[in-house]
Image (cartoon, rainbow, N blue to C red):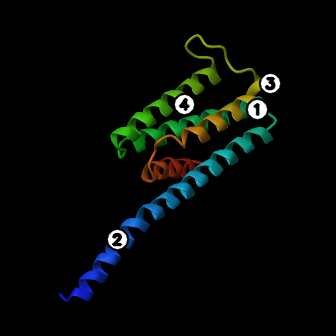
Amino acid sequence: MNKLTLTSAKILVAAFAILAPLRVHADAGFVRERLNASINQIIQNVRETEDPALKRQMLENFLNRMDRGIGMAEQIGSKEEVRSLEAMRIKVQADRTELNGLQGRDRVADADLNRFANYIQQDMEQASYVYIGTGTLIIILLILLILL
């Protein structure tokens, strides 16, 4: 291998090493935005629904899908991601408990379902910014989209 070819190869490897993380970061941002858009659409549908029983069922379905998606994502996540996902899953389960008034908690009143939906949306969007990798976010997003 001549000196010019070796230098070109080193430059190419260095460029890849610099640009690859930027591409992953951009993809993670896109996936995070798509996840948040999906959450927003689900919550918007809840807000637009008049029937409190239907609102409650829609929120229950959403929380079940999030719980299932998080559970599947835990299977592929790193140790750090799994810890974050476990915290997120505990929060989802607590929201479901509160929504339905289980384990001695007060059930969310019908008049408060839109506020509760907004609370869940903000909580899930903030949680997606905790250390969770792109692959893990993709799993959660796919579960939400497939099971809509």
- Foreground mark, 3 or 4, reads 4
Label 1: how many residues lie within 10 Å, few (<14), some (14-19) or many (20+)?
many
| Residue that numbered label 1 is attached to | 114
Q: Which residue is mark 3?
A: 111
Q: Position of residue 26 (x, y in %)?
A: 52, 61
Q: Name the quadrant containing residue 77.
A: top left
Query: From mark 4 to mark 2, how far is it between C-alphas?
Result: 42 Å
Dot 3, how many residues are within 10 Å of its Cα: few (below 14), some (14-19), or many (20+)?
A: few
Amino acid residing under circle 2: Ala
Q: Which residue does the numbered mark 2 point to in the structure image? A: 14
* Residue 62 occupies quadrant: top right
Q: Earlier in the sequence, mark 2 or mark 3?
A: 2
How much space separates mark 1 and mark 3, taking CA atoms? 7 Å
Q: CA distance from mark 3 to mark 4?
A: 21 Å
Q: Earlier in the sequence, mark 3 or mark 4?
A: 4
| Vertical position of residue 140 compared to residue 60: above or below | below
